[in-house]
Structure formats: structure tokens, C-alpha cells
Image: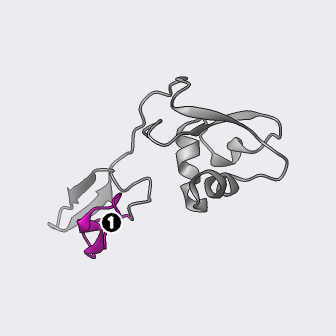
Amino acid sequence: MIDPYESALDAIPGTHPYPRTSRYHDAEIGVHQQADGTEVRYTKRRLLPPLSAAADETAPHTVSSGERPDHLGQRYFGDPGQWWQIADANPVLDPGELTAEPGQQIDIPLPGGFHG
């Protein structure tokens, strides 16, 4: 049985280079041809839309001492590997910046909200 949020293609090995839950799942795959004719596949840059302050896309979270991005991924998405969704909704380059300062407020994307 296929999860309603997955594609039937996800079950076919080699169809997607990244799992459905990966931030790179929908990234475009490029092909570079080397001088000897060998083709090398690569993931093209994943560009995000501009961050929005729309209240209907995110909810605030105040960082507690000892929290880490993976803790927030587990708490809000049920999967510690989904920390990247929170990073995408905040203006950070390093995901560690999300929880580096206890007391700071960060945005948590709501289901159907921020689309990174």
C-alpha cells in the first residue's frame, strides 16, 4: 500500500536519487558530460523562495536550553531528519544557529504553510 503523500515511483529503486522525506527529493538532477563522454549526474542547486512573515505559514517557537534542530524536527514533524524544514523557514545558513541561543524565537512551518 502506498502512503497518500508518496508516489508509486518512490517504491521503484533508482527512480529517485533521494527519499521522499529529503529536502533534495524535488531538486532537479543535471547531467554533465566529461571530455571522454562519461556522463556524471548531479543535484542542481536547491533555491528557496523568499521567506514570508505570513502568520498562516509558521508558528513561533522559543528555543530552550539544550534543544537541537533534530529535537525540533522530532517534536514538530515526528522525524528528527525533518529539521531542514525548520531551517528553510528561518534566515540561517548553519542549522546550529536555530538553537544556538536559548530564548530566541524561531519560526516553525505549519502543514501546508512554508514551501521550501
- Please report the residue visible at 56 percent of the width from the left and 60 percent of the height from the top: 81
Q: Position of residue 101 (x, y in %)?
A: 80, 40
**Start and end of the magenta stretch?**
1-18
Q: Quadrant of the C terminus?
A: top left
Q: Position of residue 113 (x, y in %)?
A: 47, 36
Q: Quadrant of the N terminus?
A: bottom left
Which residue was labeled with disc 1? 17
- Which is more toward the observer, 104 or 27? 104
- Please report the residue visible at 42 percent of the width from the left and 36 percent of the height from the top: 48
Q: Is residue 3 magenta?
A: yes
User: For residue 103, what is the image quadrant?
Assistant: top right
- Please report the residue visible at 77 percent of the width from the left and 41 percent of the height from the top: 63
Q: Secondary structure at mark 1?
A: loop
Q: Residue furthest bottom?
A: 13
Q: Main secondary structure of the magenta part?
A: loop
Residue type for callout 1: Pro
